[in-house]
Image (cartoon, rainbow, N blue to C red):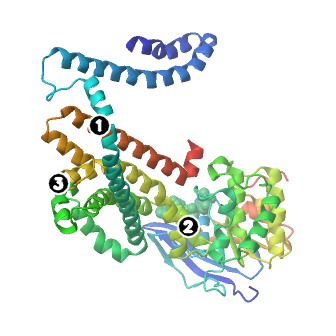
Amino acid sequence: MTRAALPVRAAPSTALADPPASLPSARGRGSRTAVRRVLAPTLAAVVLVGAWEVVARTSGLPEFVLPAPSQVAAAGVESAPLLGLHIATTLTEAALGLVLGAVVGLALAVLIAAFPVVADTVYPLVTLTQTVPTVVLAPLLILWAGFGLLPKVLLVALTVFFPVLVAAVTAMSDVDGAHVDMVRGLGGRRWNQFWLVRLPAAVPGAFGGLRVATTYVIGAAVVSEYLAGTSGLGVFIQRSRKSYDVDQILVAVVVIAVLTGALFLLVDALGRLATPWRRASR
Amino acid sequence: MTTSPDVRVRGLSVAYGSLAVLADVSLRVAPGEFVAVVGPSGCGKSTLLRVLGGLLPAGARVRADELALPVGPDGRAATAWMPQGDSLLPWRRAWANVLVGARIAGVPRDVADGRARALFDEFGLGGFERSWPHELSGGMRQRLALARTCLPQRPVLLLDEPFGALDALTRRRLNAWLASVSLGSAGGASAAVVLVTHDVDEALLLADRVLVMSDRPGRVVLEVPPRSDQSARARVLSALGVDLPALA
Ligand SMILES: Nc1ncnc2c1ncn2[C@@H]1O[C@H](COP(=O)(O)OP(=O)(O)OP(=O)(O)O)[C@@H](O)[C@H]1O
Ligand SMILES: [Mg+2]
């Protein structure tokens, strides 16, 4: 890897020394950087997985402690038909919770921005409640809301709610005073200022918060499934643990990572769609 | 629209903390009248325009013997203020930005669209309707901001250096357009205009009355009607402390 990177790093100094010769190398730099960006981490991953495979096979550790990647892959193929339903359950909880948390967070942010009274009374309280990690509330939620979908959706929503709220509130209060003045200077009332300036200004911020929150949602859903439930990746992991199927646990871990990544990309794409003026400036 | 009372300011003083910006400024703008304000940079022209637009900046201390700002039939300020910067909203395309003033004023959609169409063509912005503000030049952004301010056809326009970023030719074209707006020949009722500018010739060409302000704290040191006063140009320049006769 270092060997591949070296000529690229050397290119600027050549460019300084010899301007005419630098032209082709400058043109090649973009694609070479792209290759390095994709190739380097892929290579690193391959090396790591390879090392794991070697260690697992040669160390003599039993399979229920450290299965080799090839065994994990085999377990994945084997449990694939079973996994579908679990994935569907976890994804449903995560997606519903994500939407619920984002909608409630944004709605409260709007109320806070529109009514100073709400800002003064509710915002400090909400901030205070964040000293309680949401995962800690899972047993309570199950007690109150039963063993079904609801407590899990609520837990995910609670996890999403706060980052979205804070990001949106911050964006709306940091709004450019010149824009607000412009609206006022055209006769705009508070209401106009809100619709024309504060609300649109909150969209990029809210999506920033949502992007952060998205990386937690699958995890939050899985943790709530550890405690109760009959279906979901958390349930699958618990069952595998009881039967010492470490390879299956690892399969679930990979699936969770992939789902989290996919969800993140989806939210990121939605964010770009919702803020086309920023996309154009990139 | 025709019944809009005039702008009346008497003995206006503004200070930011211990910094006196305006001292004892008096000003009266009758309906349909065109008043230009010139003065050295930092003398408080923008501050004066903000006061007229009802936009007292936070932290400013304002005292006045009289401060009457016209109010329209809808209960909103009858003024339309154009800031020195364009303040276009980055999340609205050029077309939607121009419609901001109309939306606030509650101008019906089809009427607003028709006026926007005319302004885009008049201001040489045709073809850029769907551009984002950051894709436009400084002069184009300024023209958009002017269009946004004029579109609701408020009876009083408060324009803070609306032509600062324009080339001489475009500037002359928009000068002529603004003169026609003030005369009421651009389709709407005639509007009163308060124009802040650095360009003495622009002020003399367009205005019924030119106000010259002193260095900070700004006060009105000269008020001339350029159309009836042959020596207006010389008097304005000397009040500004410019002795050389500038080239016409
Ligand atoms: N919000 C503010 N807080 C403190 N001081 C301010 C504020 N706005 C303006 N000032 C001060 O008031 C004075 C007048 O400012 P103003 O913008 O009115 O000048 P101006 O005549 O419009 O100048 P220019 O021709 O350069 O635009 C300046 O000295 C400025 O520093
Ligand atoms: Mg100014």
From what the image shows, is residue B160 above or below residue A84? Answer: below
Which label sits in the foreground, 1 or 3? Answer: 1
Q: Amino acid at mark 2?
A: Leu
Q: Mark 3: few, some, or many residues within 10 Å (few <14, many ≥20)?
A: some
Q: Amino acid at mark 3?
A: Leu
Q: Amino acid at mark 1?
A: Ser
Q: Real-space Cα distance between discs 3 and 2?
A: 46 Å
In the rendered structure, which disc, 3 or 2, sits on the residue that comes first in sequence? 2
Secondary structure beneath dot 2 equals: helix
Q: Are marks 3 and 2 in contact (CB under 8 Å)?
A: no
Depth order, front residue of A267/A66: A66
List x then y, in percent, for residue B67: 58, 83
Ligand 1 positioned in quadrant: bottom right
Residue picked out by circle 3: A227
Residue picked out by circle 1: A79
Looking at the rendering, in which quadrant would you find the N terminus of chain A?
A: top left
Residue appearing at x 34%, y 77% in the figure: A117
Q: Real-space Cα distance between discs 1 and 3?
A: 22 Å
The answer to whether residue A240 is left or right of residue A18 is left
